[in-house]
Amino acid sequence: MKIQEALIKAYNILKEQNIETYMLDAQLLMCSVIKKDKLFITMNKDFELSKREKDEFFRLVNIRKDKMPVKYILGECEFMGINFKVKQGVLIPRPDTEILVEEAMKYIKELGIKNICDVCCGSGAIGLSIANYFKNVEVTLYDISEVAYEVTKENINNLKLAKSTKVEISDLLEKAIVNGLKFDMIVSNPPYIRKDVIPTLMDDVKDYEPYTALCGGEDGLEFYRKITEQSLKVLKKNGVLAYEIGYDQNKEVKNILKSNGFVDIRCVKDLSGNDRVVIGIKS
């Protein structure tokens, strides 16, 4: 079977399941199987697949047909121009989260920030992106999940960041509090979806991504309250607390920071014009 024949068949299989990204997904799976880039498969439509390649390609297409996210199938995800390993058990990094990293970087440059904590780190994408672009910072990453710990550890090794970063299992900031650590900045993309909204999410998300990384309690704000309260014990004076938020949580998260004494609180919108990041300074 030739590349073009296989892709057309795959497009139809995925399209029937109402997978909007059916073309891109099929192409990414093809690139992975034959170990070539998208340009190759575009320019070599008559390339003959071996039986092994054809069988493997359609095996992956059938997994995608069942709505497993293509990033889990491939085992990696691009974020901030960096390839991160991902697998079931950690949230897939989203382009929207790049806004949080970009805003954090502005404060790091402006204030000369050195010690940073990424709490609810998942794959480590936020903290490790910062460490990758700022060689003079130290980043501590925390997550309660053993899978997140393993994946972040793998990403640290792959990105050769072992000297400037470390990951530990911790229930939010508890380990930092116990060890008496102090940070100049805390960044977090905590679980923030309301419990009653989870069942309405796309199958790709609700059936495959970790519930504990999605659900923010009854009102979606549970982790903002806990992390903000704990941050008072580990953030230095004038330290920065930066969160990713849901599009409708700007007012509530700002109020949580304000009620805990934070000042200069601001919200940043994402490229779609939705409220995406809230940042405050510890007074």
Image (cartoon, helix red, strand yellow):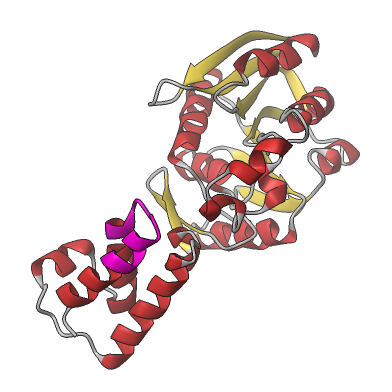
Residue sitting farthest toward the front: 16
Q: Nearer the viewer, residue 22 or 270?
A: 22
Left or right, residue 151 beside residue 224: left
Quadrant in the picture for the N terminus = bottom left
Q: In the rendering, at what x and y percent does residue 276 appear?
A: 52, 25
Residue sitting farthest toward the right: 178
In the image, residue 21 lies in the stretch drawn in magenta: yes
Per the picture, the main secondary structure of the magenta-coloured stretch is: helix
Left or right, residue 46 beside residue 237: left
**Snapshot quadrant of residue 70:** bottom left
Range drawn in magenta:
11-23
Q: Nearer the viewer, residue 231 or 91?
A: 91
Relative to 6, is 90 above or below? above
Q: In the rendering, at what x and y percent does residue 204 appear?
A: 52, 54
**Snapshot quadrant of residue 177:** top right
Quadrant in the picture for the C terminus = top right
Q: Nearer the viewer, residue 197 or 147?
A: 197
Left or right, residue 198 beside residue 112: right
- Write the residue at 65% across / 59% down: 89
Relative to 87, is 140 above or below? above
**Residue 117 appears anywhere in the view:** no
**Snapshot quadrant of residue 208:** bottom right
Q: In the rendering, at what x and y percent does residue 88 appear?
A: 60, 62
- Write the residue at 57% across / 37% down: 137
Q: In the rendering, at what x and y percent does residue 17 appear?
A: 40, 60
In the image, residue 164 lies in the stretch drawn in magenta: no
- Write the residue at 16% across / 81% down: 2
Relative to 260, is 29 above or below? below
**Residue 209 appears anywhere in the view:** yes
- Write the residue at 47% across / 22% down: 274
